[in-house]
Image (cartoon, rainbow, N blue to C red):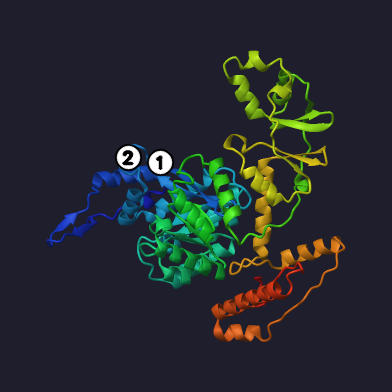
Amino acid sequence: MISAKASFFTVLKNQKLPVLQRADGKEEIYLWTQKYLNEFKAILERKHFSAVYQPLISLRSGGIMGWESLIRGPQESYFHKPDRIFSFAEEAGFLFDLEKTCHEISLLNIGEMGTDQKIFINVHPKTVLNRQLDIGEIYDTVCRQGLKSGNVVLEITERQNIHDFKLLNENLHHFRKLGFLVAVDDVGAGFSGLQSIAEIRPNFIKIDMCLVRDIHNDPIKRALMETFVTFAEKISCEIVAEGIEKENELKTLIKIGVHYGQGYLIGKPAYPKPLVDEDLYFRVFRSTYNGNNQILKQAYPIGNIVEEAVCVDIGMEVKDVRVIFDQDDRISGIVVIDNGEPAGLVMRQHLDRLLGKKYGISLYYNRPIHIVMDRSALMVDEKTPIEKVSQMAMNRGKLNLYDNIIVINGQQLKGTVSVQTLLDQMTRIRVEIAKGASPLTGLPGNISIEQELYRRHSENDPFSVVFIDLDNFKSFNDKYGFEEGDRIILFTANLLKGVLKKYAKSIPGSIYVRDRRNSDHV
């Protein structure tokens, strides 16, 4: 914990207030006066700051990747806005004490997070370089919150140019040894330039909103973003696009392949930490599923994730079905059975809406359930590939978008799959595929090769495997560089595709090209 020692807030006597040099050559005293100095010291001593959290989402799955902690002062204070807080603290010599307090507040108020979710905490380079910085104290605060250091990203903010990268990296090295992650903020604006990335070698690169704004209408910005994504993947880093405010910006960033996004369209800073709107989740999911060719659509059958269904007979009255919902909050949908076969679906929210209408109870409460069930509910065979079911589910109307999916075997009920389960499984599949797929070509690697060989072997159909090796490829790549190596890989893949297309039209087959330069596969 931070002790509010008097020495923290001691201002040197006779210290002159900072001045501005005006264009006419005259000096002008800064607007902050002794009044503001005393107010700031009082706020800092009492830790009267609060943290709000802005979500970051994956632009490949739609899920929440983490939150950035942003600091606010007292509501009615001159120091409510963050730019005033930190600018004043830096000028008055309180930056280290301020950030130390803010880090504690951010960590203590974040609440529960998922195992892989992150909290981004802003850190000025001066704070990292400060001799009083106690890394162990920050680590202890993280542990007390039940978090791991891998959940915490130190977001290096640059309000001034960094002059001593060597010392900065030495101090960051101690954080990294404990498992903390590092991000470089506002790349493309201010002092956060390419040198910062090259010297700090961050886990995340946050692209400033000036390069995101209207990117869908600006080919130069799109080209820059594409370059950043390619560069980041070559150095095992990930891109966060900041300041997303328009739907077209979001779609363009997804199409480019940006890893994560942040901005008012995704969620405004709030406390407690906000979740992402479900409609946005589905919009991102649709965009990545339908438009991203880098995702290999595997034939995972929907039957693999089916769940046991709650069923009622077609003649049961509405009031009795309502009792089943009331007895178990976990039940979201009930399948209606007619002579042992599924005939329709009743979702909790639809039934509640219907009965909640004027005369709803008097009209339907004592009627058989088939009067109100959905006869056109999505019903699929258990062998249907999960990616096809996802497409069918996402193409339903908005009112039915969250309805359960009925899975059958012939005409018999196998079970149901919720939309949440379906999307979670698709996300897991995409992650697995991404681990073995190349950002260069999108072609599958070891994971997909093993799955395809297993599938063909289990079907007992004859097949052949041809292994083609590029002699001395590593030596070629070492001499001419990765870019020329990439060109050779793409040329090889396209050559093999052309040969198969021309000479083996009647022979079904797949092409898998493996890059043996490192652990990446293409």
Whether tag 1 and tag 2 are in contact, CB under 8 A, the answer is yes
Q: Please determine whether, in this image, residue 44 is positioned above or below residue 234.
A: above
Residue 439 percent across, percent down from the top left: 59, 67
The type of residue carrying mark 1 is: His
Near mark 1 (Cα within 10 A), the count class, few <14, some 14-19 or many ≥20, is some
Using the image as rendered, state which of residue 410 and residue 231 is in the foreground. Answer: 410
Residue 87 percent across, percent down from the top left: 32, 53
Q: Residue at 68%, 53% (x, y): give it.
A: 428
Instruction: Report the Cα–Cα distance between label 1 and label 2.
Output: 10 Å
Q: Earlier in the sequence, mark 1 or mark 2?
A: 1
The type of residue carrying mark 2 is: Ser
Q: Which mark is residue 48?
A: 1
Circle 2 residue? 77
- The answer to whether residue 133 is seen in the rendering is no
- The answer to whether residue 220 is seen in the rendering is yes
Left or right of residue 462, residue 172 in this image: left
